[in-house]
Image (cartoon, helix red, strand yellow):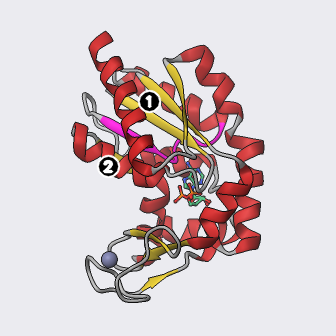
Amino acid sequence: MIVILLGSPGSGKGTQSKRLAEKFGFQHLATGDIFRAEIAAQSAVGQKAQDYLKAGKLVPDSIVIEMVAGRLESGGKYLLDGFPRTLEQAQGLDEMLKRMKSSVDLVVYLTLQKEEAIKRMASRRTCTGCGEVYNVISRPTAVEGVCDKCSAKVVQRDDDSEATAAKRLMVFEDLTHPLVAYYKAEAAFHEVDAAQTPDKVEAALSAVIESTKAAR
Ligand code: ADP
Ligand code: ZN
C-alpha cells in the first residue's frame, strides 16, 4: 500500500506521518529528513542538496527521484512525506511504481491557512540529534533547548526562519499545490483539516486509511 501525505510546510505532515507509520506499520519515507541526514553526514547527495534546503528551494527533481527510487522496494508499505513535491516527481513516482506493478493507493491533503503555517514554522524547534519536533508554544521541551528524548540540542531549523519559511510557502503554492488536481484525477483523494489538534488530525487520517484498506 502506498499512501502520500500532501501539505504545505508547517501543515504537520512529519508529525502525523510518524504517528501513522507506527500505528499502521508503514515505512515512513520523508525526503526532507533524508536530505537533512545526508547533509549532516556530508555525503555526495547531501552536498548537492544543502544549498537548496538552506534557501528554501526544492532540490532538483532528478536528484530527488533517483534518491527515492533507491529506497522503494517492491511490495513495500510506504507512507510518503514530502515526496512528490512537483508534477515531474509525481510522474517519476508513477513510473517507478508501474515497474513494480504497484500504484498510489491513497493521497491525503492536509489543508492549512498560510498565516497558520507561518506561525507554526516560526514556533517549531527541531532536535539536532534525533529529529524530534517541538513547538515553543504548543509542545516545549522540559528543559529549554534540550531534547526530552536524547538530550541533544534543540534548535530552529535554518529554513524555518521567517524569510525562508515564507519562501517555502511560495514554492509550495507554485510547484506542489498543482499536485492536488493531479491526484484528484488519478488516485483516491481526501482532504483533512490540519488546523485541528494533532490528535484530531490523526483520527481523521486514520479513518481515511482504514476505509482505503477495507476497500482494497
Ligand atoms: P517542510 O515540509 O516543512 O517544508 P521538509 O523536511 O519536507 O519540510 O523539506 C525540507 C526541504 O527539503 C525542502 O524545502 C526542500 O529543499 C527539500 N526537499 C524535501 N523533499 C523534497 C522533494 N520531494 N523535492 C525537492 N526538494 C525536497
Ligand atoms: Zn533528540
Could one spot residue 24 in this view of the protein? yes
Q: Is residue 49 above or below residue 2?
A: below
Between disc 2 and disc 1, whose residue precedes?
Answer: 2
Q: Which residue of the protein is positioned furthest toward the top in this rendering?
A: 215
- Occupied quadrant, residue 98: top left
User: Which residue occupies 29% across, 86% down?
Assistant: 151
Please name whichever residue, 22 or 39, is drawn nearer the observer in this view of the structure.
22
Which residue appears at 76% of the width and 61% of the height? 167
Report the residue marked by disc 1: 96
**Label at residue 19:** 2
Viewport quadrant of the N terminus: top left
Q: Residue 193 sits in which quadrant? A: top right
Tell me where residue 202 appears, x and y as whole percent: 38, 42
* Residue 156 locus on image (x, y percent): 55, 79
Residue 74 percent location from the top left of the image: 27, 30
Q: Residues within 10 Å of mark 1 (few under 14, many from 20)?
A: some
Residue type for callout 2? Arg
Give left or right: position of 198 versus 210: right
Q: Looking at the figure, which quarter contains the C terminus?
A: top left
From mark 2 to mark 1, how far is it between C-alphas? 26 Å
Give the structural element (helix, strand or loop) at label 2: helix
Tell me if residue 83 is in the magenta stretch.
Answer: yes
Magenta segment boundaries in residue numbering: 78-86
Q: What element does badge 1 sit on?
A: helix
**Residue 136 in magenta?**
no
